[in-house]
Structures are given as C-alpha cells and as structure tokens.
Image (tube, rainbow, N blue to C red):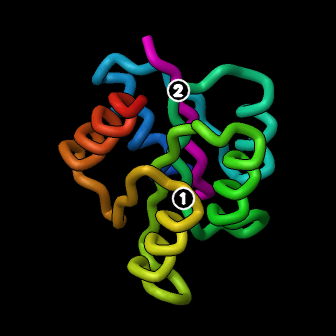
Amino acid sequence: MQNILVIDDDKLMCLALAKILISAGYNVVQASDGEEGLKLYRSQDFDLVITDLIMPDKEGIQIIRELRKENSCIRIIAMSAGGRGGATDYLKWARLMGAKQCLSKPIKREDLLDAVQTVLALP
C-alpha cells in the first residue's frame, strides 16, 4: 500500500480527502498545518504529499520548497480554493516550485484519484 500525507488546515477537507483515498486503498496520514506536515514527512516514508497552498502558519509554497530541498524527487500535489490571489496564480506558483499536479477546490473524487494515480506512476 502506498502512503500519502495530506496537509490542509481545513479539517473537513482533510477528512474528506482522507476518506476518498482510504476507500481507494491508500494509507493516509493527515496534518492540520504546514509545520505538522513537515514533521510527519520527516518521521515517516511517504510516496506522495498532497498540500493545500493557503494556510495560516506556513503556506503550501513554503512547504513545497522545503520538501523539494530535502528530496528533489518527492511527488507533490498542490490544491487551492483561491484566497487572496485566486487559485490559478497559486497553482501556477506551485507548479513552478515542483508540484507534479495541481487541483482547484472543490475537488471531485474522480479528479483526486486520477491525479494521485498519475503522480504515483511517475518515476
């Protein structure tokens, strides 16, 4: 089974994503903010990290930057509902920073699972 770390300050979103992923056969660990997510990443082996981009303590772009610094091959999916600059701008930055896929919230089950399967299939 593949291990996925989901980082999102919206607890309901985090839970919803986890339920979808668990029902598809993945092991899921949830983090409610960027700092917790980084600590969990450093303490366990993950095949994929899914992170929100707009969070209060540490934004997703910073998380992506730190993760890529530690592991240049890490697979990351970024997600955003928009916020201050609009989802498109944040997702564009996430791509430039190394996210393999980007999803706009709200996320459909099929879109999430397609993105996860695509990213996990990458070398």
Left or right: residue 121 compared with residue 62: left
- The kind of secondary structure element at disc 2 is loop
Can you give x and y, in whole percent of width and height, for residue 46 in the image? 59, 26
- The kind of secondary structure element at disc 1 is strand
Instruction: Decide which of 109, 16 is in the foreground and name it.
Output: 109
Q: Is residue 114 above or below residue 19?
A: below
The residue at 32%/63% (across/down) is 106
The residue at 51%/45% (across/down) is 76
Label 2 environment density (alpha carbons within 10 Å; few <14, some 14–19, many ≥20): some
Q: Quadrant of residue 23?
A: top left
Can you give x and y, in whole percent of width and height, for residue 103 in the image? 35, 60
Q: Amino acid at mark 2?
A: Asp
Magenta part of the protein: which range? 1-10
Looking at the image, the residue that sits furthest to the bottom is 85
Q: Which mark is residue 47?
A: 2
The stretch drawn in magenta includes residue 3: yes
Instruction: Decide which of 101, 1 is in the foreground and name it.
Output: 101
Can you give x and y, in whole percent of width and height, for residue 35 in the image? 80, 50
Q: Which mark is residue 105?
A: none
